[in-house]
Amino acid sequence: MAFNLLKGKRGIITGALDENSIAWKVALRAHEEGATFVLTNAPIAMRLGEINKLAEATNSKIIPADATSVEDLTKLYTESMEHLGGKIDFVLHSIGMSVNIRKNIPYTELNYEFYQKGIDVSALTLHKMLAVAHKLDALNEHASVVALSYIGAQRVYPFYTDMADIKAMLESIARTFGYHYGKSKKVRINTVSQSPTKTTAGGGIKGFTDFYDFAQMQSPLGNASAEDCANFCVALFSDLTKMVTMQNLYHDGGYSTTGVSSEQLEALQK
Ligand code: NAI
């Protein structure tokens, strides 16, 4: 069901790699709600070609950009404003990658080059996207920026290794930039802490399926799907959440405030 929540709004959506990506679902929902937007991803991800299908389905333009490059981001905002016909109302940061996780390197033995790469790609890209927008004055008043995070920023999940630290940094950037951008332009910035979700990034984590089931068992509402996450992001992009900023918002079916569920205890007794 669509409510025209984003009618007339212009956006930039990062991170749609394939149809499992959270950003893919956000793009579909934002389109249904009347938004126009540009899709962007790292040039290397373009080679997959899947994003073309999404661009067709949502009638949107693709502007490749490596989000670690200030030059690429400057081009992204400039061309997006030209193409969409004005300043931007919402931005989705849906970018995450850890080479240490991909290579199964334990937290106590992290490779520091990979660690820095992870920080650059998964956290500093948010700062860069905000700093470039600020410099170009590319965002409208009350624009909404959402970045995706995970509860590993607050609690230890051994398999999440360096991404735990990186997500903590991402959330901190959202808060701190949220202060500055709120003061100067009333732009709001939040992170959404999402349930484990079956995507390329999620599936790259060792033991992901077991952990997905564990979280499912712990959450009174079950794990939040990528589609549910898209609905929440659309709500955050809309004017209905105009005064929400500098928050890390749990979108996890109640997982984060449940100590233990009866199903988990029963499983232990077996
Ligand atoms: P995904 O693998 O579909 O998306 C990650 C995206 O980051 C890809 O599209 C990739 O091309 C893009 N990317 C990587 N390096 C880039 C760069 N240098 N410049 C521009 N884009 C780049 O996976 P998913 O799960 O949709 O991830 C989106 C976000 O959601 C990430 O921040 C992830 O950490 C977060 N998240 C995912 C959860 C999960 O269980 N899948 C749970 C909580 C948060």
Image (tube, helix red, strand yellow):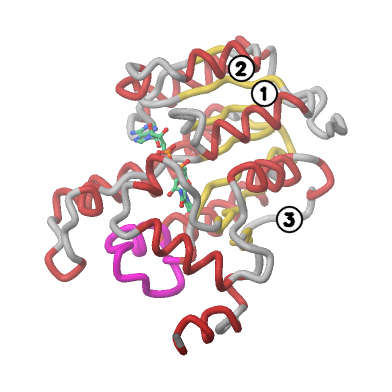
Query: Would you say residue 115 is visible in this rendering?
Result: yes
Q: Amino acid at mark 1?
A: Lys
- Tell me if label 2 and label 1 are in contact, CB under 8 Å: yes
Q: Amino acid at mark 2?
A: Met
Quadrant in which the N terminus appears: top right
Residue neighbourhood size for the residue with mark 1, other residues' Cα within 10 Å, grouped as few (<14), some (14–19), many (≥20): many
Identify the element where label 1 is drawn.
Answer: loop
Q: Residue at (50%, 15%) from the top-left corner?
A: 62
Q: Amino acid at mark 3?
A: Val
Q: CA distance from mark 3 to mark 2?
A: 25 Å
Residue 49 place in picture, x, y as percent: 40, 15
Residue 128 place in picture, x, y as percent: 42, 39
Query: Which residue is label 2 attached to?
Result: 81
Identify the element where label 3 is drawn.
Answer: loop
Q: Is mark 1 within 8 Å of ligand 1?
A: no
Query: Which residue is label 3 attached to?
Result: 244
What is the magenta segment's predominant secondary structure?
helix
Residue neighbourhood size for the residue with mark 3, other residues' Cα within 10 Å, grouped as few (<14), some (14–19), many (≥20): some
Q: Is mark 3 within 8 Å of ligand 1?
A: no
Query: Which residue is label 1 attached to?
Result: 87
Q: Which of pointers 2 and 1 lies earlier in the amino acid sequence?
A: 2
Residues rendered magenta in the picture: 152-168
Q: CA distance from mark 3 to mark 1?
A: 21 Å
